[in-house]
Amino acid sequence: MAKEKTLEDLFHDTLKDIYYAERTILKNLPKMARAASAPELKAAFEKHKNETEGHVQRLQQVFELMGKRAQGKTCDAIEGIVAEGEEIIESFKGTPAIDAGLISSAQAVEHYEITRYGTLKRWAQVLGLKDAVTLLDATLKEESMTDKALTALADASANAMAKVA
């Protein structure tokens, strides 16, 4: 008979999902930075690449706390979001709308991550994984700050620039 799946199994499965997502994002951020036209947006993508390296390290620590090997499993959601971002780059590169498109794509990624980290943090609390809660909360806060920074860039210039014909 199949083993009953528990919250710990779900937590581990979701951890593998976000680990794959973070590593995929890490590979794609340089491409987004290169495609951006505004220096502030390029800098934001480069800063987030450094933060994302830290997110990967924190996730590795959470795997360690569980006594599990850090490994990802294909995350269809992030694959789709990244594909949409690549489509925006192809369609809008060199146009006034590129930065607004890149920001929208980056925010889709951030919102996915915020959802995943928020859920993992709550599950870690229920499972009594105090150190994991601390690690996941640190990343959740960084992802939220990145989302706010992207909104500020969009409001400051990218959206208005995109409107220019």
Image (cartoon, helix red, strand yellow):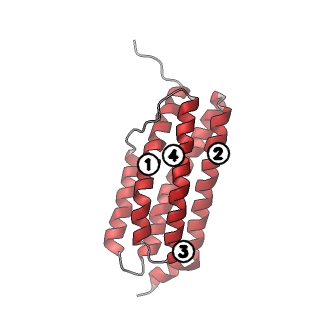
Residue at 37% of width from left, 46% of height from top? 76
Q: Secondary structure at mark 4?
A: helix
Labels 4 & 1 near each other (Cβ < 8 A):
yes
Determine the residue located farthest toward the top in the rendered image: 1
Amino acid bearing label 2: Asp
Q: Earlier in the sequence, mark 2 or mark 4?
A: 4
Residue at image coords 39%, 71%: 35
Left or right of 165: which side holds 65? right
Label tally: 4
Residue 131's mark? none
The amino acid type, in three-letter code, at marker 1 is Arg
Residue 22, how many percent across, how many down? 47, 49
Q: CA distance from mark 2 to mark 3?
A: 27 Å
For disc 2, the marked residue is 137
Alpha-carbon span between mark 2 and mark 4: 14 Å
Measuring 42% from the left and 65% from the top, which residue is drawn there? 32
> In this figure, which residue is indicated by the disc labeled 3?
40
* Foreground label between 1 and 2: 1
Residue beneath disc 1: 23
For the residue carrying disc 3, how many other residues have a C-alpha within 10 Å: few (<14), some (14-19), or many (20+)?
Answer: few
Identify the image quadrant of the N terminus: top left
Query: Mark 2–mark 4 contact, CB under 8 Å?
Result: no
SS of the residue at dot 3? helix
Residue 17 to residue 144: above or below: above
